[in-house]
Amino acid sequence: MAFGNSFTSYDALLKEYYSDDALENEIFSENPFLGLVPKMEKQTGRHFVQPLVYSAGQGRSASFSTAQSMASLTGELAVDFLLTRAENHAVANVSSQTIAATQNDKGAFMEAVTLISDNQLQNLTNEIADSLFRGTSRARGQIASSVSLSGSTISFVNPKDVLRFSVGMALDVAAAETSGNVRAYGSAGHGLYVSAVDYANATISIGTTPTPGATACPLNDSTNGIPTIATGDYIFAVGDRNNGLAGFGAWIPYGGVASNDSFFGVNRSANPVMLAGNWLNGQGGTTEEVLEQALAQVGEVGGNLTHFLMPFKKFADLAKSLGSKAQIVDSKVSPQIGYKGIEVVGPRGTVTCIPDRNCPSTMIAGVNVKDWQLNSIGKIVHVWDEDGKVWLRSASDSGMEIRFYSLGQLVCKAPRNQINIQVSA
C-alpha cells in the first residue's frame, strides 16, 4: 500500500485532534447552505420517515348533502418519504518512518495536525456542501464536444464545472448521467487520473499517475485511459456515481417531475408543486427581475422564501443592478458563523441573497431554510473514533491512518416553499 503522506513529502506528524466545536466552525465557515440548514444528528435505524400532507379532504360544498357525500369519498392526502442515508468517506495516512523521525519536534507536530486533518476534513466537507445543491448522480461535469479524445485535456460543457475538480482525483465516465454502467477502464485497471487543473482556462489534464507533472495520458489510451470514452460523457469521481445524497436539485427538480416519478418511495406527480416545489426559467431578464418573479410565483401557492442562494456572478450582477439601494446584512447561524448578503423585498417580508461557491453556475436556489434538515448519525462530518482511537494502525503497511465519514441525508419538509431557478452561467 502506498502512502500519500510519505517520509519525503512530510516533515511532521499528526497525533492530536480538534474538539468538536473547532471542527464545526471549520466545516461551515465557507459553505453557507451547509451552515444555514438545521441539523439533526441522531438518525439511527433503517430510515427516517418524513410525512407530508399535500391536500385536505374535499368534503365541502354549498350543498350540505354534497359536502357530506364528498366527505365519504375523500380524505387527507399524505405521503411518507422514507429517507435512507448517503455514505461518504475520507482517509489520510502517514508512514511509520515519518512518525519515528518527527516524534520530538513539537513545532512540526502542530503543523502536521493542521495540514493533514484540516485538508481531509475540508475535502469531505466540500463534497457534502456541493452535494446539498445537486441530485444523487454525483456527476461533476460533462465532456465538451470540442475535446480531442486522443489528447490529454478535458474541457466542459459548463466551463464552471472545472471548479469541482482537484489534482489527484480518479475519474469514471459514463454515456448517461444515471442509467447504464460506467465505461470500462484500460488494461491498467484504473480511472482517469487528474494531474493538473487550470481554473482560469476551465480545463483539467489527465496523466498516467494522480500526481502533478505526471506523464500526459490520452483520454482513450488503451492502458491508462478509458478506451471507449466519448464527448458528451458525464464525469464522476471514482465510486461516486449514483451514491450521492439527495440535494436541493433532487428535492426541487427543475422542470418538475415525470408521471412515473419515484423519490424515496413517493410518486410526486400527484401534486408536483406541493411535493416537489417550484421551478422557473430565469434566463431572460436581470437577476433582480428574476428574483421578483420567483417571489411572486412562490407566494401564489402559499409559499414563503427566506433566502436566495446563488453563484457569485449572479450575486455580483444583483449588487450592480441594485447599486446604492443594496442593503448588506448579516445572516447569523451562531456567534462564530455568519454570512453577508443582500436583502430584497418580497410579498411576505425581506429575503436574503447569499453567494455560495457550491451553487451551480446555472442555478439560483430559492429556499426557506426552516423547511430543510440535514439528518446524520453523529455530526455530518465525523472522525472514526468509536473505539477511542483517532489514529489507526494501517492493516497492510507500516504506518497510521485517520478516517472520516459522513452518514446523512437532506430532508425538505415543505417543497412548495422552495424554487429552482435556471439561469445563464
Image (cartoon, grey):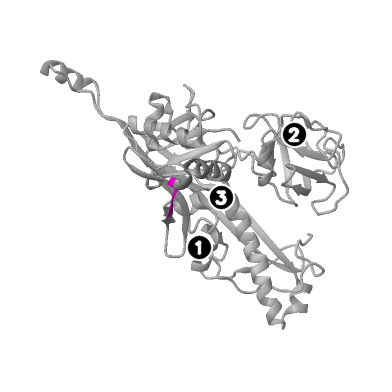
- The residue under label 2 is 183
Q: Which numbered disc covers residue 24?
A: 1
Q: Tell me the quarter of the picture where residue 150 sits.
A: top right
Outermost residue to the front: 324
Mark 2 to mark 1 CA distance (whole Å): 38 Å
Q: Bounds of the magenta span?
A: 325-329
SS category of the residue bearing label 1: helix
Q: Find out whether the residues at labels 3 and 2 contact each other: C-beta distance under 8 Å.
A: no
SS category of the residue bearing label 2: loop
Quadrant, the C terminus:
top right
User: Identity of the amino acid at label 2?
Assistant: Arg
**Mark 3, mark 2: which one is toward the viewer?**
3
The residue located at (71%, 36%) in the rendering is 156
User: Identity of the amino acid at label 1?
Assistant: Glu
- The residue under label 3 is 128
**Badge 3: few (under 14), some or many (20 or more) residues near its Cα, within 10 Å?**
many
Mark 3 to mark 2 CA distance (whole Å): 25 Å
